[in-house]
Image (tube, grey):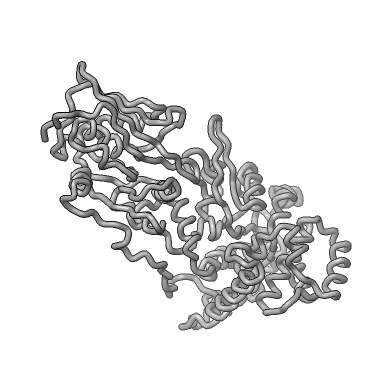
Amino acid sequence: MPYANTLAMISKVPSAIPFGFEGRLVTVEGDMNRGLPNFNIVGMANKTVSEARERVKSAITSSGFLFPDKKVTINLAPADLSKDGSFLDLPIALSILILSGQLLESDMKDRLFVGELSLSGQLRPVKGIINIVELAKKSGFKEVFIPIRNLPQASLIKDITVYGAESLGSLYQHLKGQIRLNTQKNLQTGLKTPNLSPNSPVLDHIHGQQLAKRALAIAIAGRHNLLISGPPGAGKTLLAKTAVNLLPALTPEEQIEITKIYSLANLKTDHAITTRPFRNPHHTASLTSIIGGSTGPGEISLAHKGILFLDELPEFSRNVLESLRQPLEDKKITVSRANQKTTYPADFILIATMNPCPCGYLGDPTHTCTCTSTEIHNYQKKLSGPLLDRIDMYLEVEKVDNNSLFLPPKSTFAEHNVVKNTITESISQQSLRYKNSYTMNGNLSSFQVSTELKLTPSARKFLKSASEKLQLSARSYFKTIKVAQTIADLEKAPQIDANHLAEALTFRRRQP
C-alpha cells in the first residue's frame, strides 16, 4: 500500500494500561522525519514495551502494509508513568499507519485501542482488559478495540461498545468500513450458575461431624473465618472443600470484580469467571505469592468473594501469617513498593486447619501423642494472639468411627440442599437489614454492630456475664455478637437471644 500524498507530522492514538486495580490512560504519539531509517520508543517503557519495535514492524509488513523507511519516534505519554507489558503494540502500529498515510487521524476519534501483536499481525489477548474498558467508559470513549479473545471478559462492562479484532488487518478493514467486527453484544453475557457435580464434595458425603457441618453453615451464611483443629484423618480438608459448594451464586458486580482480579494475575484472559474461587496455597508459598505485589494480585485477592483455604496453618511462615492480619480486618491489601502503592480487594472467607500438636495426635484416644510439652507449646504459639483474634470461629473435630464410614452412599443431595437453601435465606435477610447485597454479618464494624444489631434483654445480661468470665477482648466481644446474629438469621429470629450467644461462644478458641 503506497504512502498517501500528505503524511501526518504527528499522530496520536488513545490507549490504556492496567495500573494496580485500576487503569491509566496512555496516548501513543508518533513522529516521522527524514533521515536514516530508525524506529525508537520513548516514554518510560520497560523491556517488554521496547521489544514492541520488532513485533510491530513485522506485524505491519506481514499484514500487507508498508513500514516507512524514515526516522520514526514513538512517545508514550505521560512520560513519567512506567509502562509494562504488551498492551500498546496495537496503538503503536496504528500510530505508524497514520504517520505513513495509510490511516487517518480521524479514524481514531472517540476510540481507544489495546492489544498485543504477533509477528504475523494477529492480535493476542492481554491481561487486565476489564480495567481498560472500565477506564475507557469513565473517560468518555464511545468505542474500544481489543483482541477478540478478550471479548468475553469485556462483555461484562455495559453501556460501551467493545469490538474484538483477530488481526491488525481485520481492524484496518473495519476502520475503513469494509467489514464489521464482532462486538460484546454478539455474546451470551448472562450469568451462568454451574450445576453441582456429583463428584464434588457435599454435606451428604460426610459421615457424622454434625457440629462441623453446623459451623460451616454459620461461616458461609455470615462470611465468618473458621479454624478447624483435629487429628489426621478427621476430615478437616474434606469439610473445607465442601464449603465452596455452599457459597451463594455470584452477583453481576461480584463477577466483574473476580474476573478483573484473575485477568490482572494473567490467569484468565479469554473468559469470565462464573464461580466463586477456592484458593488452596501450599504452606511453602512465599509472602509475595500470598499478598501480591507490583506484578499482580496474590492468593488472598484471588480468593476475593470466595474461600482462602490454608491447610496446616501453623506450617506457614510467620511473615505470611502476620500479613493476613490487615486483609482479615480491612478486606483489602495495600502493597507498597519504591515508586508505587497498589491496593487489591481481599474480601474472602478464611477456612484454616491445624493439628493439635506436631504429631497430630494430642488428645486422640486411639493414638499416643509423641510430642513433648515444649514442642506442643511452640507449635501452638506459631499462631499469634492478634491473628487468632481475627478468626471468628474455632472448631475441634474428632475422627469418625471407621465402622460408620462404610455406609451406602446417598444418591441425593438432600442435606446439602436444605443447608444451602437456609444459607441463601439468611443472606437475603442480611441484604434487607443492611439495605445492600455486599454487607454481611462478618464484615460489620464495631460501630455497625452497636447500631444495626438488636439483642434481647436476656441476651445482654448473658453477654455481660460471659465476657467478664471469659475475659473477651473487644474484638472477640464483637465477633461473638456477629456470629450470634448469623445464628439468629439461620433460625429466622428477629433478635439475638441468649441461646444464640451461647452457641456462638462454643466456637471461641479455648486458651491452651
Does 296 sit left or right of 187 as displayed? Answer: right
Q: Is residue 397 above or below residue 406?
A: above
Residue 84, quarter of picture: top left
Give the side of residue 85 with respect to residue 444, left or right. left
Above-or-below relation of 42 to 247: above
Q: Nearer the viewer, residue 321 or 101?
A: 101
Q: Residue at x 65, y 76 (%)?
A: 490
The quadrant holding residue 55 is top left
From the viewer's perspective, tell me whether residue 150 is left or right of residue 369. Answer: left
Picture coordinates of residue 462, whole percent (x, y)? 85, 71
Q: Residue furthest top?
A: 35
Q: Position of residue 268 (x, y in %)?
A: 39, 53
Q: Quadrant of the C terminus?
A: bottom right
Q: Position of residue 383 (x, y in %)?
A: 69, 50
Which of the two residues, 250 or 17, is positioned nearer the viewer here? 17
Query: In the displayed structure, does residue 367 sit left or right of residue 457?
Result: left
- Whether residue 400 is visible, yes or no, is no
As drawn, which residue projects farthest toward the left? Answer: 2
Identity of the residue drawn at 45% across and 52% down = 260
Residue found 53% across the figure and 69% down from its top: 248
Q: Is residue 435 visible?
A: yes
Residue drawn at the location 40% of the way across and 68% of the way down = 192
- In the rendered image, residue 507, in percent from the top left (x then y), is placed at 72, 66
Q: How many marks?
A: 0
Quadrant including the N terminus:
top left
